[in-house]
Structures are given as structure tokens and as C-alpha cells.
Amino acid sequence: MNSTETKARRKSSSDASLQGEPRRKSGLLPFRKKTVVFGSWIWAFPSLAAVAVIHYYATYVGGSYAFTDFNGISDANWVGLDNFIRIGTDPQTMGAIGNTFFIAVIYFIGVNIIGLGLALALNRGLKTRYFLRVLMFLPVVLSSLAVSYIFKFIFDFEGPLNKVLMALGQEPKLWLGDTDTAIWTIIIVAVWQNAGLGMVIYLAGLATVPPELEESAAIDGAGVFQRFWHITLPMIQPAVAITTTLSLLTGLRIFDQVVAMTGGGPFGATDTMSTVIYRITFEYSDFGYGTALATVFAIVLAFAAALQLFITKDRSGK
Amino acid sequence: MFRYTKWTLLREVLVWIVALFMLLPLYLLINNSLKDSITSITDPLGLVVTPDFGNFVTVLESTYAGSLPLGMLNSFIITAVGVSILVVFGSMTAYVLARRTSKVSKVTFYLILVGIIVPAQLGIVPIYVFARSVGLLGSVWGLGIIYGMMLMPLSVFLYAGFVRSLPTDYEEAAFIDGSSRFNTFRKIVFPLLSPATGTVAILGGIIMWNDFFTPLIFLNNSVSPTIALVVYSYAANPVLIEWNLVFALLILAMIPITILYLIFQKRFIQGFSGGIKS
């Protein structure tokens, strides 16, 4: 018993020496007050190296491709800002940037309004609220590619939506093949799938609002909307910040839905930055132009995240 | 206190109508996977009269979708490798960074968090070029490791938030009893971190299991597809789309995650809404 104890002390003593403390003979240890040391930097090394390589170094190298005509095989030549200038003069790419913002904004509004609405409806009172939460969240865990194919069927010219319209005496529409409606089909599938995610984050926020607070406000004569605006909304501030930021970034990154449903068509009407970057880089092997676009995309995403966090920052001074 | 009034009942009925409307696509999915190819087009909304489970067999015997079991195995390997990396290295890194109060650890922590926002599209190009040059394209193990590295910032963020909420008492007691730092972590801290481990495994696991973009780059046209690639190569085949067969494949592809979700629904929902508490 005694010997194992000494062994352990000796071990911790040698561990401490790694932290730059002077090495002491184990016999002296009991007389010296020591503080606990938490872990070792060596433990963090693999992750730090991984993040440095994958996130920093690779992003740096990818960004440096943007100034070349690299095609993945032959040697890269420095072309300066040519790739970035090409973005501005390429109607296909400019259209995709416009589509990306359009999708992101509508998706952002949809997920937040529907998510918050569902959360408020399912927060308290309803007998079946737990069951409904589980049902409404189900699409979130499914593959967005698989989900998109269900909607491709729904919006198909011979699909159920047109069947219903025809039964109501309306003209069937080419939803996926019409430049006006195709982008909306992408937004609808994305919102449908992720509204449940907004819901659960808002529900977690609403759980922090004590019911007594709302009750006392109600007794003081505050209406439903007043209570929501002055009590509930300020208290679920963290949930608002998370859901808005998350949905903005997800909306800007839409990829699977487009590939599954429209392939970017008709005539680029549903192309997004992600699909264009994928096509240019990995299908056309135009790594220079592709990474130039990806660089712009990265800046847009970082800017959107920073702006969103700044707007929804908690200013109540807590 | 709260009373169940007729207004609550009305609200309950309204929410159910919304819920049923939202679940309509899933009804169409299941319903039409059991029909023949003609009825799924002529009458997609009507409830199936004679369910035909043969579609599930047909689809597994077809050229493209036949590799679904292989795709599931690959997706499983990738997810298992990735989640293991996230749990082992993420927890240790977060522990060191969250427990140490030096400026270096704080700055390091924020430098890691930047990785959550940096989009993958830019860094993935050099990784692709590198993987191609060393022959790692098409390797499921390689993709699992790449995922583990790519999602590491998320794992460190989730673990660190949880470590900060733990008191240091246990570690101090273990230290006084002469436990080594690694043993303290392995036997005392790590078990205490199990809620965070659950969150990391669920979030990371779902991201990897459902991802389409990354396998499309690293495994496309290889002999080792993931589930998403099997679905894509079958459903995107423009020659002849038979929706009943596509839907049968989609259901098979969705079954594993749906079952896991229904068993652990509470943990899943907590995992997704968990970031808010840390």
C-alpha cells in the first residue's frame, strides 16, 4: 500500500517537472504544498495540429490557388487578380451569388418564424406537446439529399402537387423547370427540413422563461403580444442569436437540395455559390477560379456570421 | 397556474393540423414506396391498397442501388472513425484548454473556434489535391480521419463548455490521493463528461452520416460509396425514374438514423439544442 503511494507521488512529481517546476526528490514532496495540474499540453497537440493543418494551412493554400491558373495537374502560374475580376464579369457566377442571398434571406425568415411559432405553440399546455416535438424534429436528422428527392417528386410535373391543383381546376405547373418557381422549391424543402431545428433551440430558450413572470405581467394587464415583446423575446435572446446565426450560415451554404432537385437549372436559376464552386473546381478542374470564388464565399460567410452576432448581441448588460 | 381550457384544445387541434401537413411528405414517401410504378404517378396521394414490399427487394437487386449495404457499412466506418477521433482528442484538448487559465490557452481556444466558421470549400481543394497525390481518394478510413479533423473545433467547443461547468473538486481529491493526471482524466473526468460526449457523438455523427458534399469529392465513382452516394447515383440516373423504387431506396437509407432517433429522441433533441446552455 505504502509503496504504491510513493510510486504515485513520484510519478506526479515527474509530471510536474514537465511543467517547468524544479525536480525534487520524492521524499521531500510531503513538505511542499503543491497545486493540482490539469492535463498536459501534449494531450492537446493532435487536435491543435489537425486544426492548424486542416483549417488554417489548407485554407491558406486554397486561398493562394485563387491567384493562379492551377488546374490540379500542370504547374500553377501566377495570374494576379484575374480570377477575381472574372467573377464580376461572369453572369453565371453573379447570378449564383444573387440566388444564394435570396435563398439565404427567405430561408432565414422561414426557419425563424416557423421555428419560433412552433416553439411558442408547443411550449406549455398541450397534452401531446412532447410527441409533437419528436415528430416535428424528425426531418432534421434525415439526410437532406434524401429529403430533397421526396420534394422533387412532389413538385414533379406529374407529381402530387399538380394532381391536387388539377383536381381544384387549376393549370398544372412546371415547378422545377420554371425560372420563377424553381428557387422556391429549393427554399421550401430546406425550410421544411430545418424548421424543427429552430423549434428545439427556441424551446430550450423558452424553458428558461419562468411562467410566473408572464403570469404577473398578464395580471398587470399586459396583452399576449406585449408579453411576448417585452418579456419573452428579451429572455430568449441567446436562442435568437444561435438560431438566426445558424440559419443564416446554413441558408448561404445550400448545396444538397439543389443538386438533387434541379442541378442548378433551369438556366442557372437555382445555382448557389456552393454548387458553382463545386462544379468549377471539381468538374471543370478550374482550381484557380474555383478557389477565388470560394475565397469570396468564405469572406461572405465570416462577414454574415460576425454581423449577425453583432446585431443579436445581448446588450442588456447582464 | 395553467389551466387546460377550450382555447388550449383549439390550439392543440391547430398544431396537429400543421403537424400533419408537415408530415405529408413522409406519408407520400412511405405510401408510394409500396405501390407499383404506375400507381405512384397516377394516384400518388391515395392510400396504398395492396402494399407491395417487393420494391425493397427490386431496388437492392438493381445495378446502382444494390450497393446500399456496402454504402451503409462505409458510412458506418466513416462515422465511427470520425466520432472516435472527436471524442478522444476533442475531450482531452478541451479539458486542457478549459481548465488552464493562462492567456495562451485562451487564445488557442479562440483560434480553434475560428475553424467552426471557416467554410470547408476553400480548404478542401488542397486537401483533395493532397489526397489524390498520395492515393487516399476513395479511402473510407481516410475520409473518417478528415472528418475528425474538420469537425474538431465543434467538438472542442462543446466539450469546453461542459468542462467549465464542472467543479475541480474531484480532480483535486484525486491529485491528493496520488492519481496521475492521465488516470484522473480517464477514470474521473471523462466519465463526468459523458453528457458532452453524447452531444458530440450525436451532432458529429449526424453530420458525417448525412453529409453528401465531402463524400462526393473524396469517394465519388470509387468502389466504396457512402449511403448518400448510393442514393445519388440511383436517384439522379436520368434514364428512367421509377419513384416507387427511389422511395423504397430512400426508406432503406433513412431507417438506421430514424430508429436511433426514435430510441434516443430526448438525447438527440438535447444535443441539437444543447449549444445554448454552454
Image (tube, rainbow, N blue to C red):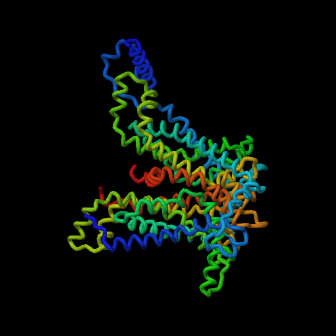
From where the camera sits, is residue A206 visible? yes
Closer to us: A114 or A79: A114
Percent x, y of residue A312? 40, 62
Percent x, y of residue A142? 57, 58
View extreme (left): residue: A220
Q: Name the residue at 43% across, 22% down.
A: A17
Closer to us: A57 or B41: B41
View extreme (front): residue: B50
Q: Is residue B222 left or right of residue A227?
A: right
Q: Is residue B205 left or right of residue B180?
A: right
The quadrant of the picture occupied by the N terminus of chain B is bottom left
From where the camera sits, is residue A308 visible? no
Tally of marks: 0
Residue A142's place in the image compared with A192, above or below, is above
Residue A310's place in the image compared with B105, above or below, is below
Percent x, y of residue B45? 61, 73
Residue A37's place in the image compared with A114, above or below, is above
Percent x, y of residue A303? 51, 60
Q: Name the residue at 59% across, 50% down.
A: B208
Residue B154's place in the image compared with B26, above or below, is above
